[in-house]
Image: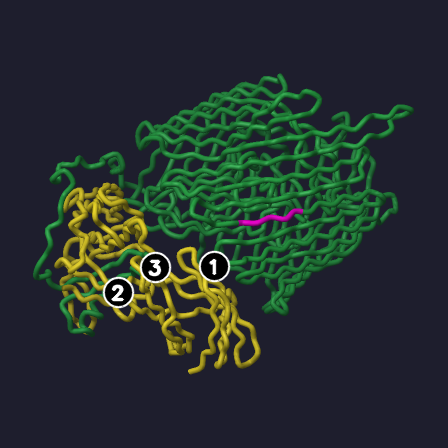
Chain colours: A yellow, B green
Amino acid sequence: MLVLAAAAVVPLRASAQQFAAMVSPPRFELEGRPGQTQRQVIEITNGDASPATYKLRTADWTLDDNAAVKLADELAKDSCRPWVALERREITVPAGGRYRFRFEVTPPPEATGECRFAVLVGGGAATVDAGQNISIPVNAQIAVIVYVTLPGAMPELSIVRTGVAERDGRQVPLLYVRNTGRAHGRLDGFLEGTDAGGRRIEFTPNGLPILPGETREIALNVASEADPRPAVTFPITIRGNLEWSGKSTPFEARFAP
Amino acid sequence: MILRRAAALVLAAGLLGATLASAQSGAPAVSAAAAPPTTRYEDRLIDGGTLAADDEALGAPYNPEGWARYWRVEGVASYYDQQGLITRENGFRLSGRIDTPQYGAVSADATLRVGPGSFIATLVQRDFAFDNRWRANNSLGVVTTLGIDLTRTQYRFYLPTFAALGGTTEWIRDADLQLQASVGEPGNFDGFRLSGFQSLHGTLSTVGAQWAFAPQWQAGAQYVDTRGVDSPYAVNGNGQVDSRAGYASLAWIGVSTRLQANVLASDASTDGLSVRANGIWLDGRTVWAGLTHNYGVFRLEPGLAWGYQPINNDIEGAYYRFAYSSLRWQMDGGIDLVDSVSGRGTNGTYLTLNGRYQLNTRMGLGGNGGYLKNGSQYAAQASVYGDLVWSQGVSRLQFSVLTNNNTPSNDAQQISLDHTWNMPAGTRLSTTINATRDATGSYASGDATVPGSTLRRVGVGLLGGGDITNNVSLDANLQYNLLTLNGSASGVYGNVNLNWRLSPQWSIIGTYYDNTDNTAQLFVLDPLIPVVNPLPTQRSRAVLLSIRYEDRAGSSVVPIGGRAGSPAGTIAGTLFLDLNDNGRRDPGEPGAPNVTVLLNGRFPTRTDESGRFEFPFVAAGAQTISVIPDNLPLPWAIGSPRFTVDVSARSTATLDIAARRIR
């Protein structure tokens, strides 16, 4: 198993001596039908000045507690990768060229719920300077995340608890959201808080996916274009409506460190 | 850098590999795996791996030698019929660009037109950098004269620039000093697809300078001199304008407040009749209590002119605007109080209020209203609307009422349903259906009474397009109006574009335009222009065919805004007049021609007769598009003249820019 660490912001372009690929789209959120095949296209562009060879394969993935992707080559217990067929396992793209790579998903007739997998676009070996005069040969790759939701599969989100923790050097109000449904969900909505200083501050939940069966920490971010963003003085009471997948629920909670 | 971070994570974790991934954000992940995995699932292959590669998109062999360059040659044949007036425009357009490492970006555009014969050419050099913080921009040919930045940062009044056959030069030292000069023979653009230049004779010269002489302070001045210029407003075509005009401005830019004082003096003589006039106006902007406030006072004497063009004059008064924006609320409103300086004009008041409330992430409600009183004339309009995001796209239901007491009076009501459909990638579709009642009152003409009339109109429209095959795309803007007015026939407005890519270099573009709808649009409110009942539109049609060759070469891939090795795509868009002010282009909304659009403030292009513009070879990633709105027809303006576009490699990023009515 590959163990993965996450970065909060990842540029679309990866640069290395032999790996300068652009991949589009970055994510698929598809609606599948049991027994029916759908074909999708990933555009892979070689930004390097010389032709590049890429290896393609699928992987299972999950999210760890820090919302970092964990990829797995071996089949997961409930993997749907057997539903997936790739165009080929290796392609060569000329300098500056684009390749329309095709893959198909065929959910079996009895399939329900949601299928998740990744298509990995891997490049050739490159040497990475890890600092302190240490160089490591690595394989660079880009993972395209794919969700295939089957009819009737919906997220069911509920707030298990709330809290406050330091994130990126700031105290942030947090929701812990459980998904008891059969498809991933993302929390949305408009929230307004009144902090200890009496100031009214608008918040929005971050858009992290909450996978079926998991409980995920969702930060409530201050919605402001002001620079710097207004600092929140705790305790703060936040209320409003939380929304996901067309559903809405009232919310009110007091947050204190 | 990325891989370095990945490797550092490998070491920190003491694990076999590391991947930077972001399934949560949807961005692709980049990983660095130090060792191969132990067990791998063997993926199935489509047709056992025998599926032929989609070679179409792989691109042609690329010549990496020399500086990055791009060129295009286009042969155009077109036929226009406006109320029976036939115009045939045939000719060529050539454009090219080269990004030199030492002399900035050099671009050239030329149009040769037969039919109404014309040849125009422009050579532009931008971002010619010097060691001592100076940069220069120069242009030669049919150019747009320059205006210092302070002429554009006023809130209420604009000083226009001019089209001229001549040259311009601009020297900029960082952000603190700007020097400009322009000279040439002024004129107007004409033509449809192939622009020509209609000279007004005489000469026009401008000089300008702007200096940030202290922190938070800017001062600037501009002088325009015109001699022997044919007045574009002369009744019999004999008017000749000699004029001098000077403008000076002083701005203070604080943290939350910006103040700008402007003075303008002009001495304009038409056929020997001289008019001297002065203008002074003060603009302010303050961000306070969560609101943005714009305010100002002005006094512009009768006869005030800028070059050979009269500008707003014989008015004095004050204005105030506020704007508020939050997650749920968007509000703005204001008041203008305008009096005639000479007493010969009319005194007016203009009120406007817009509001929108987002009920939830899917539904929003809003409304706007305006009231204009100009002497004994008044006009008012009000609209309410609801927006809904649902599984099939975005819908807006809107109801509008308008009324004025012109002679004849005009009352109109309109209800419309606009929808932008969720479509598969590569396709787009918006539809509209609207019903309008437009009543004109009776009025006295001598001893007779002209009876009023009522037009009832039901319109349906479609704006959409998509890729029919890998190489053929079709776009259409269609509107069908069913009329009931004294037996008037129904009318159609249609614009269809077909783009056939024969090879990476060659393409054929065909356009057919037909407007048999001669109904008038609804009137608009503008605080500085008396309300006029619109005239029926002209019936017109056009056919256009162009064959285009374009290619690029240069050191590997050095696209605009990029660096060697950067993938590139195209930015294409339309600058359109947003009639219903919803920010999206709906069927029937026309494009704005001859407006300059800049990529990254450096590379210019101009919208065609349909308002379309294109930057064909742009570095992938976030790029900035800005608009110089000088050629926008009044009362239209661009709210935010800068836009960020995400360009993907070898793809076309589209940007529709809405020009909105100044309220």
Quarter where residue B192 is shown = top right
The answer to whether tags 1 and 3 share a subunit is no
Disc number lying in front (3 or 2): 3
Give the letter of the chain under mark 3. A
Q: Is residue B208 above or below residue B612?
A: below
Q: Which residue is mark 2?
A: A63
Instruction: Name the kind of residue labelled 3 in the image.
Output: Pro
Report, in whole angstroms, how far the alpha carbon at label 2 lies from the one at label 1: 49 Å
Label 2: state its secondary structure. strand
Q: Residues within 10 Å of mark 3 (few under 14, many from 20)?
A: many
Q: Nearer the viewer, mark 1 or mark 3?
A: 3
- Which residue position holds label 3? A155
Label 1 CA crowd tier, 10 Å (few <14, some 14–19, many 20+) = few
Q: Which residue is mark 1?
A: B133
Residue at point 37%, 39% (across, down): B426
Q: Is B470 left or right of B477, judged from the image as shown? A: left
Which subunit holds the residue at mark 2? A
- As drawn, A221 above or below B98: below
- Amino acid type, callout 1: Arg
Looking at this view, is B86 or B134 the one in front?
B86
Which secondary structure lies at badge 1? loop
Q: Disc 1 versus disc 3: distance between alpha carbons?
A: 57 Å
User: Which mark lies nearer to you, 2 or 1?
Assistant: 2
Q: Is residue B122 visible?
A: yes
Q: What's drawn in magenta, residue-wise?
A: B383-387
Q: Secondary structure at mark 3?
A: loop
In the displayed structure image, the side of residue B12 where residue B267 appears, left or right:
right
**Does residue A50 appear anywhere in the picture?**
no
Q: Badge 2: few (under 14), some or many (20 or more) residues near its Cα, within 10 Å?
A: many
* Whether marks 3 and 2 lie on the same chain: yes
Separation of disc 3 and disc 2 at Cα? 16 Å
Please determine if labels 2 and 1 lie on a single subunit.
no
